[in-house]
């Protein structure tokens, strides 16, 4: 398997010398890497277009590391030379049979002059250095490995990194690792990363039952008869590159700093004794590391328990590996209980799993089809994903394919499948940098959610009493706690850890020792995901190949490449940042495929996974599929619903998907694909059946085209009205929880209220009393008879008649309010009144329904000003009342805070000094023991032990030792509970700590100094429980007469 597209040996030695000089010139910082900025300046001298140079960079940097080494630089120069000769730059240009040894270097304008200037400057620098030798030693820049040292405190900017991996190291040390260490992410989820974790080669892990050909598969790829010292099948073996063939025990591998296996120490010596590393020199191992695993137990073997956590180890390796191969044998298709647990431990790494049906040449074609079906049947029950897993069929060993059994068709199939699998393996080194970024973003999101969980548990703990019960309650209701965190911080539910595993880990911790939420750390991680990583990714484009089980955004790019979802979501130049709300479970099923194409310069295509139907609907997706389609529908300009003449049924999930397109009906188009598979008559029937089905789902009689910006503005306006209405309905002080629950339960009725309020704001009702002022009537459009009567009324100027009419109307209204029957009678009488009276009555009623209390129909300008002033005064009074209530609430809240603080202090003091009386009673006992010890010791010193032959001396000595031990133990016990003894000799007298018994004339010490201590003092923490009884010095006055 060849990984480098063109080896250095394909270039002549003369050209290699020239390219080495060019490389040294382009490498401005001397780190043997040409980064994007250096390459831009250097490649610009070729006078090629920017699009061609992008293509050159993309082909040369095949591993997407963000820099060019010397070998990649030679490839870039050869591509530029071919482009200058007129050949189009394509991915397979160098492997298309072009003679590269005799290919001349490209023409670089002005390069010779610049290199001559550089050599001249270097000579001047060398001469200055030789003249000033020893005056100032040079300081070398720290390597990337020193960033992980605790002594390294220098922060390096992202602009100084020379590769994407170095940038990730820097971001991890500066922003992510502090968050992980603060909230113990390494204890719950994954150990802290080291330098070797970033520098490690991509890994491939093989899992399967015994004798499925895992070790033989590795031997087949390496073309070796054995893998170093022959490994046994009962252990994990890491096969990696090395200077010679040797085997390193697991305990040694786990402590080597240059190997990424230090995290395996958590599984103990029982596992490390079943783990080893096999090293050997091989070109393939320079790019890939293989992990061979022991056979998964099945049948009777499952009764024997392993000495270590097998599923935990496989889960650890799954997080580190870039590809996971599940190997099956045609004669071993059963999935045992342990194999189910192993596959379950791979949760979250579904995109890495590939299935290999090995030894397929042992059965014929008919049996192979049945074996393949049985395998898919078994996998469908274990892998809870609606998408079909990729299965490679073949015989991966050094033996020739058994043509007698498999036949020519089987041989051709096996060869194609083997080519596909080897192609998948070849792409692993190219995707290594992609995978690192993808896993790094996933780890950052997991650490962020972990910090929210830990800080929430800390916040829920009581301040004083009942901590043990509260902690146990939180552990028992951990799922509810996860829900609170998810709702409070709007986190995707699929990104939360497994509840049972988290509960099991939590049981060994004290929640009081957890840290509170530190917003600065969270903001640093958000900035890293939102700004730092996108800026870092501007130097390279990355990603795995798209598959049909995921959403794929197909857009224009300089070359054919794909970018993983976690990386796409944090790139600032792509409109997919909103997809982070659907969590890592979705982002692992989303990617962006870029390629150069004229059509993609105009539009971007979004391919989606197939909508589930039939039995597949029983398998739940790990993300909100309808929510994702709704998000894309809002962004897209056209939505195509594709149907097959043989698949016209609209499943339940398809109905939910179509319902999620509500509001975007003008974008929907229906495509009946593969219509050439049926004749014209059948096509008409198919078309009718399709329209029948769609008519039941799409409840839209017509299509209305509305600008997306206007639709968004209207939706935001309505949303603001709803939110503000819910806020206004909440009480000020008490009953907030019940009020919120009531509003949620009656949300449908509450939706109507803000709509009415919004209508009133847009179209305020006209006060009927103002109608005459502005010259129009307040009544609704009258009919023709009323218009005629209006003309007659205009000529009637009899005030007496008008007054009589108004009195009759008022009397009718009074009778209407007094009795129900009279109300109906007056209503019937009003119908028989003249149109003139009916019009005046409606006008009067409209005025009485208004907020004004003025009885006159017409208002002058002064009346209006007076009315407005009264309303403003009333409004000011209401504002003052509200301010008083707010002041009372704030004062009450402050008083409650003070009461809580005082209660907390009093509780702490009562707990702290609860033993004060008991300790004070023991002080006399301690004094007596001290006196007894001193007296016995003094008496014992006067006895001449040489003249005493009796046993009394030994008994007294034993008694003395017992008394001293008792005194010492009592002092230690008192000290343990905060009671300490203090001796204030030669200290200034303090009335708070000392009790003066007598005075001593002493001129050698300042007056007020403690000269003698009769009884030592004791303190309980910082409180004196017994003052020391002391004698204090007194100054001696000189007798002037005596001196004279």
Image (cartoon, rainbow, N blue to C red):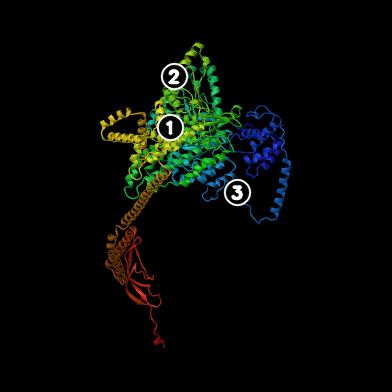
Dot 2 alpha-carbon crowd within 10 angstroms: few under 14, some 14 to 19, many 20 or more: some
Q: Quadrant of residue 805?
A: top left
Q: Mark 3 points at which residue?
A: 141
Query: Foreground: 845 or 981?
Result: 845
Mark 3 or mark 1: whose residue is earlier in sequence: 3
Q: Distance between the residues labelled 2 and 3?
A: 69 Å
Dot 1 alpha-carbon crowd within 10 angstroms: few under 14, some 14 to 19, many 20 or more: many
Q: Is mark 1 on a helix, strand or loop?
A: helix
Q: Is mark 2 on a helix, strand or loop?
A: helix
Q: Name the residue under label 1.
A: 342
Dot 3 alpha-carbon crowd within 10 angstroms: few under 14, some 14 to 19, many 20 or more: few
Considering every residue shown, the one lying at the far bottom of the view is 1044
Whether residue 929 is visible, yes or no, is: yes
Q: Distance between the residues labelled 2 and 1?
A: 43 Å
- The location of residue 1006, given as percent across then percent down, is 40, 75
Q: Which mark is residue 693?
A: 2
Whether residue 224 is visible, yes or no, is: no
Mark 2 or mark 3: whose residue is earlier in sequence: 3
697, above or below 123, in the image: above
Q: Which mark is residue 523?
A: none
Mark 2 or mark 1: whose residue is earlier in sequence: 1
- The location of residue 222, given as percent across then percent down, is 56, 31
The quarter of the rendered structure image containing the C terminus is bottom left
- The location of residue 3, given as percent across then percent down, is 60, 32
Badges 2 and 1: C-beta atoms under 8 Å apart? no
Q: Quadrant of residue 916?
A: bottom left
Q: In this view, does 466 lie to the left or right of 345?
A: left
- The location of residue 672, given as percent across then percent down, is 50, 19
Q: Is mark 3 on a helix, strand or loop?
A: loop
Query: Foreground: 277 or 156?
Result: 156
Label 3 or label 1, whichever lies nearer to me, is 3
Q: Distance between the residues labelled 3 and 1?
A: 45 Å
């Amino acid at each position: 398997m060849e990984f480098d597209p063109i080896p250095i040996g394909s270039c002549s030695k003369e050209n290699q010398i020239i390219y080495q000089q060019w490389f040294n010139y382009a490498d401005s910082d001397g780190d043997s890497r040409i980064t994007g900025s250096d390459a831009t300046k250097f490649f610009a001298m070729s006078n090629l277009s920017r699009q061609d140079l992008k293509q050159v960079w993309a082909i040369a940097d095949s591993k997407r590391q963000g820099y060019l080494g010397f070998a990649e630089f030679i490839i870039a120069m050869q591509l530029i030379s071919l482009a200058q000769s007129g050949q189009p730059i394509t991915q397979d240009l160098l492997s298309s049979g072009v003679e590269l040894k005799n290919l001349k270097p490209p023409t670089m304008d002005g390069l010779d002059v610049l290199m001559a200037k550089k050599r001249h400057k270097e000579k001047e620098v060398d001469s200055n250095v030789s003249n000033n030798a020893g005056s100032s030693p040079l300081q070398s820049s720290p390597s990337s490995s020193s960033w992980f040292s605790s002594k390294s405190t220098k922060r390096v900017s992202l602009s100084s990194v020379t590769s994407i991996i170095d940038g990730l190291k820097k971001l991890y040390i500066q922003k992510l690792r502090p968050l992980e260490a603060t909230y113990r992410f390494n204890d719950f989820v994954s150990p802290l990363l080291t330098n070797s974790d970033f520098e490690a080669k991509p890994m491939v892990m093989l899992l399967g039952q015994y004798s499925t050909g895992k070790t033989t598969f590795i031997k087949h790829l390496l073309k070796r008869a054995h893998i170093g010292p022959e490994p046994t099948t009962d252990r994990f073996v890491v096969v990696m590159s090395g200077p010679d063939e040797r085997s390193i025990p697991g305990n040694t591998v786990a402590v080597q700093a240059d190997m990424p296996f230090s995290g395996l120490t958590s599984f103990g010596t029982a596992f490390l004794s079943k783990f080893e590393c096999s090293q050997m020199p091989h070109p393939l191992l320079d790019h890939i590391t293989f992990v061979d695993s022991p056979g998964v137990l099945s049948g009777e073997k499952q009764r024997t328990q392993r000495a270590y956590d097998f599923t935990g180890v496989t889960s650890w390796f799954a997080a580190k590996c870039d590809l996971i191969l599940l190997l099956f044998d045609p004669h071993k298709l059963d999935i045992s209980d342990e194999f189910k647990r192993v596959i379950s431990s791979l949760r979250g790494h579904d995109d890495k799993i590939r299935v290999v049906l090995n030894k397929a040449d042992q059965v014929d074609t008919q049996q192979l089809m049945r074996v393949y079906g049985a395998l898919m049947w078994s996998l469908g029950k274990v892998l809870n994903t609606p998408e079909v897993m990729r299965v490679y069929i073949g015989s991966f060993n050094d033996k020739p394919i058994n043509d007698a059994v498999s036949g020519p068709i089987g041989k051709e199939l096996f060869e194609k499948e083997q080519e596909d699998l080897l192609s998948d393996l070849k792409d692993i080194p190219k995707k290594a940098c992609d995978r690192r970024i993808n896993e790094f973003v996933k780890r950052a999101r997991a650490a962020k959610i972990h910090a929210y969980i830990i800080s929430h548990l800390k916040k829920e703990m009581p301040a004083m009493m009942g901590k043990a019960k509260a902690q146990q309650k939180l552990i028992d209701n951990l799922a509810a706690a996860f829900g609170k965190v998810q709702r409070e911080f709007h986190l995707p539910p699929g990104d939360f850890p497994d509840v049972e595993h988290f509960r099991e880990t939590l049981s060994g911790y004290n929640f009081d020792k957890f840290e509170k939420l530190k917003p600065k750390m969270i903001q640093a991680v958000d900035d890293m995901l939102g700004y730092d990583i996108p800026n870092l990714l501007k130097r390279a484009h990355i990603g795995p190949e798209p598959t049909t089980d995921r959403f794929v955004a197909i857009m224009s790019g300089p070359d054919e490449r794909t970018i993983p979802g976690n990386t796409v979501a944090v790139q600032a130049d792509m409109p997919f940042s909103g997809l982070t709300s659907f969590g890592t479970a979705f982002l692992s099923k989303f990617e962006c495929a870029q390629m150069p194409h004229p059509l993609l310069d105009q539009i971007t295509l979004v391919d989606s996974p197939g909508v589930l139907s039939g039995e597949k609907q029983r398998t739940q997706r790990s993300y909100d599929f309808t929510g994702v389609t709704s998000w894309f529908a809002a962004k897209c300009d056209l939505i195509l619903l594709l149907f097959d003449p043989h698949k016209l049924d609209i499943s339940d999930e398809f109905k939910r998907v179509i319902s999620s397109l509500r509001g975007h009906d003008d974008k929907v188009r229906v495509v009946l694909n593969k219509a050439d598979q049926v004749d014209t008559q059948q096509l008409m029937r198919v078309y009718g059946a399709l329209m029948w089905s769609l008519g039941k789902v799409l409840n839209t009689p017509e299509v209305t085209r509305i600008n997306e910006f206007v639709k968004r503005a209207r939706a935001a306006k309505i949303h603001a009205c709803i939110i503000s209405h819910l806020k206004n309905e909440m009480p000020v002080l008490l009953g907030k929880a019940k009020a919120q629950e009531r509003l949620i339960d009656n949300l449908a009725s509450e939706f109507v209220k803000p709509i009415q309020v919004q209508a009133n704001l847009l179209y305020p009702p006209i006060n009927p009393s103002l109608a005459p002022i502005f010259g129009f009537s307040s009544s609704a459009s009258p009919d023709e008879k009323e218009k005629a009567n209006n003309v007659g009324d205009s000529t009637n100027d009899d005030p007496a008649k008008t007054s009589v009419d108004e009195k009759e109307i008022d009397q009718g209204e009074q009778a209407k309010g007094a009795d129900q029957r009279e109300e109906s009678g007056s209503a019937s009488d009003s119908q028989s009144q003249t149109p003139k009276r009916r019009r005046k009555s409606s006008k009067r009623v409209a005025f009485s329904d208004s907020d004004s209390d003025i009885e006159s129909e017409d208002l002058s300008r002064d009346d209006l000003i007076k009315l407005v002033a009264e309303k403003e005064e009333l409004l000011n009074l209401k504002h003052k009342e509200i301010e008083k209530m707010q002041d009372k609430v704030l004062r009450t809240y402050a008083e409650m805070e003070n009461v809580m603080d005082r209660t907390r202090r009093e509780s702490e003091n009562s707990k702290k000094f609860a033993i004060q009386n008991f300790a004070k009673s023991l002080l006399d006992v301690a004094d007596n023991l001290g006196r007894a010890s001193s007296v016995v010791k003094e008496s014992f010193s006067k006895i001449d032990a040489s003249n005493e032959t009796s046993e009394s001396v030994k008994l007294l000595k034993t008694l003395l030792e017992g008394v001293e031990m008792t005194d010492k133990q009592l002092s230690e016990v008192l000290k343990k509970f905060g009671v300490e003894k203090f001796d204030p000799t030669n200290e200034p007298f303090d009335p708070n700590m000392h009790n003066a018994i007598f005075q001593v004339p002493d001129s050698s010490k300042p007056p007020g100094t403690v000269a003698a201590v009769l009884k030592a003092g004791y303190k309980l923490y910082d409180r004196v429980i017994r003052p020391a009884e002391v004698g204090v010095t007194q100054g001696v006055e000189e007798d002037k007469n005596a001196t004279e």
